């Protein structure tokens, strides 16, 4: 019985050790920079998306649609907290942009959304 | 649109996983606490065989549950297969499958017969892998407490609900023997504290994830929690009936066992729908995180306030008006069916033909979407090879036609297959479960909730109608009597919700 008890306690510990670093859960966009519908001045832009829960930024995707219809996939950078996804984009000219995001959350759910913003001349 | 269908399929797979997991854990605990110490060799052998089968089901369900998001990551988001498979959620699903495999292999060893407790370590690991793919660990704050509460919640639910099929097996295998009575009493002794723990952990999780009464009635998550509370109330009533019958088992003997059997089977049907609701809940963001997206009580009342149903298309037909007419006409149809079934129960013989009215859903299936054949340019299942929402609508409305014809031939004696009478309650329950996973392509969360709210209500009463009819067929004389009145009333309520539905 004692061995069974030890195994009962050891199994989850072992599972935790062998298992990957923490998984993430269903995410909801809490805030963003730029915000949806915001107007920013031309030039480089640091993008930041903040979610309500931990996300797997490495396996998430950000795509910027330019006013001329071009699309660029942005590389998410490592953020200070696991609920934030950041990326840097340079030289944005005037016009209407859309930032599409596909975010993988811990339980395997994928959150999709789009943020529209306008860039004006300096 | 494909995303909506994938979400629905993913929720169904998650529900399958919860059901298989409950059968595995509940079975192992039943073997440990009831079948091994109190049962006979045939019962122990059969129970272990079911545990093994459940372990296999968990492995398949883990694979299916992981497959849907993996397909999304690789197909839609362009990740390499290796990178997708190394995602934490996929690894946890893999570990869950390995835990179930370990439990399944252990059941084949002689040691599992002598000391069934050896099954517990892999099962604890299995629950942990489930916790690691839940909302609880993803939270930014309070993860440890939430994870612990979720672990306790899932374990208690699995021990109770998952043990029910094994209890039924014991009743059938050992009917009338002293061992059977002892097992029934032992099961009650295990189930009662499990239910208490389940309720406490559920209350705490709801308080943390929902946060307020406004969120309870103003969000899809809250509506599903309310449905779970309602289902749980029904399960408790049935459980209480079992508990009372269990106490009288020495005096009433076979009569008590028949009552317990009927109640336990009905409990199982309702519990399966609860697990689908639980899986559907995991696909919703907790409202505590989305306070800006809550629907107010006034907005909700504005949508459900009783009004005369819209039975004809208005002069200027919008897609919302078209859909409202479809739902309202369906509602009137279901309402009449419920009233006729009630009249038949009251003794009016001509009302026995009520199942024929289900054929009316063929017309609703044709009308379900304006862009599709025969009204618009798209095919029967939508444009471009099929629209998931159209497919769901058309299949969900066509299925009742077949079941209606079958039920009519059975009720009027044209087809004599007593076993097929169970198809109708099973269909009602499965349909209700499907409604809980049903999704609409509406990007506005508030509008989406206003549409989905009535679906949750219909699923609730639809599941109860199925459970009631099942009890009428399988319960003892007393249960049969009141269940015969109960399920037509549930049909009437589904009809009223549908007749009042609007988009």
Image: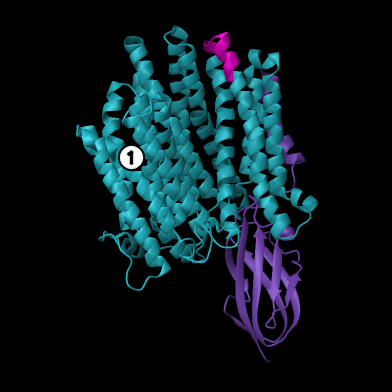
Chain colours: A purple, B cyan
Q: Is residue A121 left or right of residue B35?
A: right
Residue at image location 58% in from the left, 17% down from the top: B46
Q: Quadrant of the C terminus of chain B?
A: bottom left
Image location of residue B187, percent across then percent down: 47, 21
Residue B39 lies in the magenta-colored region: yes
Image location of residue B384, percent across then percent down: 60, 62
Residue at image location 32% in from the left, 12% down from the top: B252
The reply to whether residue B151 is in sight is yes
Q: Nearer the viewer, residue B334 or B51?
A: B334
Instruction: Give the magenta range.
Output: B36-47
Q: Quadrant of the N terminus of chain B?
A: bottom right
In terms of image quadrants, where is residue A29? Answer: bottom right
Q: Nearer the viewer, residue B380 or B327?
A: B380
Image location of residue B304, percent across then percent down: 32, 59
Question: Farthest bottom residue?
Answer: A122
- At mark 1, the secondary structure is helix
Q: Which residue is mark 1?
A: B355
In this rendering, the answer to whether B390 lies above or below B436 is below
Number of marks drawn: 1
Image location of residue A80, percent across then percent down: 71, 63
Residue at image location 61% in from the left, 73% down from the top: A115
In this rendering, the answer to whether B185 lies above or below B277 is above
Residue B99 lies in the magenta-colored region: no
In this rendering, the answer to whether B12 lies above or below B159 is below
Residue at image location 31% in from the left, 55% down from the top: B499
The reply to whether residue B233 is in sight is no
Q: Is residue B447 left or right of residue B102?
A: left
Q: Chain of mark 1?
A: B
Tell me which secondary structure the magenta stretch mostly adopts. helix
Question: Farthest top residue?
Answer: B177
Bin the neighbour count of mark 1 within 10 Å (Cα to Cα): few under 14, some 14-19, many 20 and up. many
Q: Is residue B236 left or right of residue B111?
A: left
């Amino acid at each position: 019985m004692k061995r069974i008890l030890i195994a009962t306690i050891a199994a989850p510990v072992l599972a935790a050790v062998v298992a990957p670093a923490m998984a993430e859960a269903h995410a909801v966009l809490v805030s963003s920079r730029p915000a949806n519908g915001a107007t920013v001045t031309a030039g480089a832009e640091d993008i930041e998306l903040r979610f309500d829960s931990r996300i797997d930024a490495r396996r998430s995707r950000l795509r910027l649609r330019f006013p001329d219809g071009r699309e660029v996939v942005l590389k998410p950078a490592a953020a200070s907290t696991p609920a934030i996804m950041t990326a840097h984009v340079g030289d944005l000219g005037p016009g209407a942009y859309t930032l599409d995001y596909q975010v993988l959350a811990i339980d395997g759910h994928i959150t999709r959304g789009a943020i529209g913003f306008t860039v004006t001349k300096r | 649109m494909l995303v909506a269908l994938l979400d629905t399929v993913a929720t169904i797979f998650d529900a399958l996983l919860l059901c298989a997991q409950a059968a595995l854990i509940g079975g192992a605990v039943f073997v440990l606490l009831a079948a091994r110490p109190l049962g006979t060799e045939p019962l122990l052998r059969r129970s272990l065989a079911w545990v093994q089968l459940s372990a296999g089901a968990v492995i398949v369900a883990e694979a299916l549950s992981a497959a849907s998001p993996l397909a999304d990551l690789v197909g839609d988001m362009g990740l390499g297969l290796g990178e997708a498979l190394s995602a934490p959620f996929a690894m946890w699903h893999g570990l869950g499958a390995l835990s179930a495999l370990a439990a399944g292999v252990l059941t084949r060893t002689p040691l599992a017969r002598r000391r069934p407790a050896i099954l517990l370590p892999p099962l604890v690991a299995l629950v942990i892998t489930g916790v690691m793919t839940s909302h609880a660990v993803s939270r930014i704050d309070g993860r440890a407490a939430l994870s612990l509460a979720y672990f306790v919640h899932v374990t208690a639910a699995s021990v109770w609900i998952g043990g029910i099929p094994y209890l039924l097996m014991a009743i059938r295998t050992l009917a009338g023997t002293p061992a059977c009575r002892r097992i029934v009493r032992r099961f009650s002794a295990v189930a009662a504290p499990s239910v208490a723990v389940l309720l406490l952990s559920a209350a705490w999780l709801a308080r943390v994830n929902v946060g307020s009464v406004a969120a309870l009635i103003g969000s899809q998550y809250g509506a599903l929690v309310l449905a779970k509370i309602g289902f749980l109330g029904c399960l408790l009533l049935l459980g209480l009936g079992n508990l009372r019958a269990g106490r009288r088992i020495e005096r009433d003997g076979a009569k008590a066992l028949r009552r317990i059997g009927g109640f336990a089977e009905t409990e199982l049907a309702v519990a399966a729908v609860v697990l689908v609701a639980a899986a559907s809940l995991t696909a919703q963001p907790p409202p505590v995180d989305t306070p800006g997206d809550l629907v107010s009580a006034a907005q909700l009342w504005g949508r459900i306030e009783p009004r005369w149903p819209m039975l004809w298309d208005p002069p200027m037909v919008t897609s919302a008006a078209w859909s409202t007419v479809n739902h309202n006409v369906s509602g009137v149809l279901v309402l009449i069916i419920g009233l006729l079934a009630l009249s038949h129960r009251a003794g009016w013989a001509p009302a026995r033909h009520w199942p024929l009215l289900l054929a009316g859903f063929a017309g609703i299936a044709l009308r379900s979407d304006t862009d599709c054949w025969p009204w618009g340019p798209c095919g029967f299942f939508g444009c471009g090879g099929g629209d998931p929402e159209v497919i769901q609508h058309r299949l969900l409305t066509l299925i009742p036609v077949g079941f209606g014809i079958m039920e009519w031939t059975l009720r009027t004696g044209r087809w004599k297959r007593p076993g097929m009478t169970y198809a109708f309650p099973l269909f009602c329950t499965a349909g209700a479960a499907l409604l809980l996973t049903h999704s609409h392509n509406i990007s506005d969360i508030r509008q989406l909730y206003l549409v989905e709210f009535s679906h949750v209500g219909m699923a609730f009463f639809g599941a109860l109608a199925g459970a009631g009819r099942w009890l009428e067929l399988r319960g003892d004389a007393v249960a049969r009597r009141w269940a015969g009145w109960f399920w037509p009333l549930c049909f009437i309520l589904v009809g009223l919700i549908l007749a009042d539905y609007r988009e």
